[in-house]
Image (cartoon, rainbow, N blue to C red):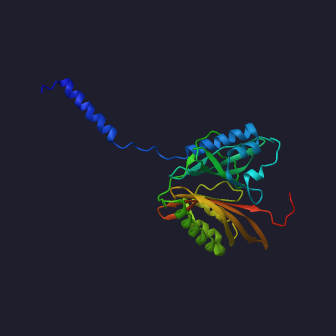
Amino acid sequence: MWNSPARGNWHGACLLAATLLAAPVAAAPVTPAPVVAAERAFAADGLALGVRDSFLKHSAPEGIVLAPEPILAKAAFAAPAPKGPPLVWWPLWAGIARSGDLGFTTGPYSVGGQPRAWYFTVWARQTDGGWKWLFDGGPPSDPTGAAPQGSEVAYARLSGRQAGSPGKAMTQVTAAERALHAAARTDAPAAFLAAVADDGRITGSKAAPPKSRTELEAEAATRARSITFSPLGGQASDAGDLAWTYGLAQWTRDGRTERGHYVRIWRNDEAGWRLLFDELLPAPPLNAPPA
């Protein structure tokens, strides 16, 4: 059969199109951008609606706050409340699971125009694709010198391994926490420095969030020598590569028994589960009168 140049070109184009259609489509890279967008929408509603209504709008049904004990956000904000002074916050550091269903952000906040501290929020993707927070409450870290609102958000690197399911991940994280808690009863600062990721953060004092190993060591040194921890809950991502946990803490300082709560992000690194974020939040004694 006679084959014209035009027909040959048409045949080559068809082969090229078929090859392109058969080639696998590269998946979009996983980044914390959706979590950052959810946090910014939450913050915008904080100004527009006030604290109570914005917190109710953006919290998951199982979302908790410390007031001062862990309580469902829906219960904590059940009663009507005035809008109050402007609460302004913005994310500067964020992370996400490889499965894109669990993440966090943290950054500075101000009340009535006065810088206060840093917030920390754990986020979960919902069945409808939207995001709701599971925990909101941050350390008293100094916001002085923090990048201003609208600044670029730094992303924590993704995990190096995946457990394959939330159940397997939580079994592994529980074991990692048991080891950390056992070591913390003897030497808490050393225990946390051994467990933290090389890009992780330990917070809880009034110092700015650490950005180097030297600052991590200084922050860890602010903690009591011996701390007793009791887990209360948490959950892992679908990929089994990121998890958050929270629980009770008790320690002795200057002869006084003190207590509080911990909140953590664990990441499944090549070297095993490592602390990506840890905050220790003091709480008043259980028998203390209401403030």
Position of the N terminus by quadrant: top left
Of residue 284 and residue 221, the one placed in the foreground of this image is 284
Give the residue at the far left of this rendering: 1
Q: Residue at x 53, y 55 (%)?
A: 238
Q: Which image quarter holds the C terminus? A: bottom right
**Count of labels in the image:** 0
* Viewer-proximal residue among 221 and 261: 261
**In the image, farthest residue toward the bottom:** 186
The answer to which image quadrant residue 257 occupies is bottom right
Q: Report which quarter residue 64 is drawn in.
A: bottom right
Q: Where residue 224 sits in the image (x, y, percent)?
A: 70, 69
Q: Is residue 208 above or below residue 53?
A: below
Q: Is residue 215 visible?
A: no
Location of residue 46 in the rendering, given as x and y in whole percent from the top left corner:
72, 41
Residue 205 located left or right of residue 28? right
Residue found at x 69% / y 66% = 223
What is the residue that sits farthest to the right in this orientation?
289
Identify whether 1 is placed above or below 134. Answer: above
Q: Position of residue 199 (x, y in %)?
A: 55, 56
Whether residue 261 appears in this view of the structure is yes
Residue 7: image x %, image y %? Answer: 20, 26
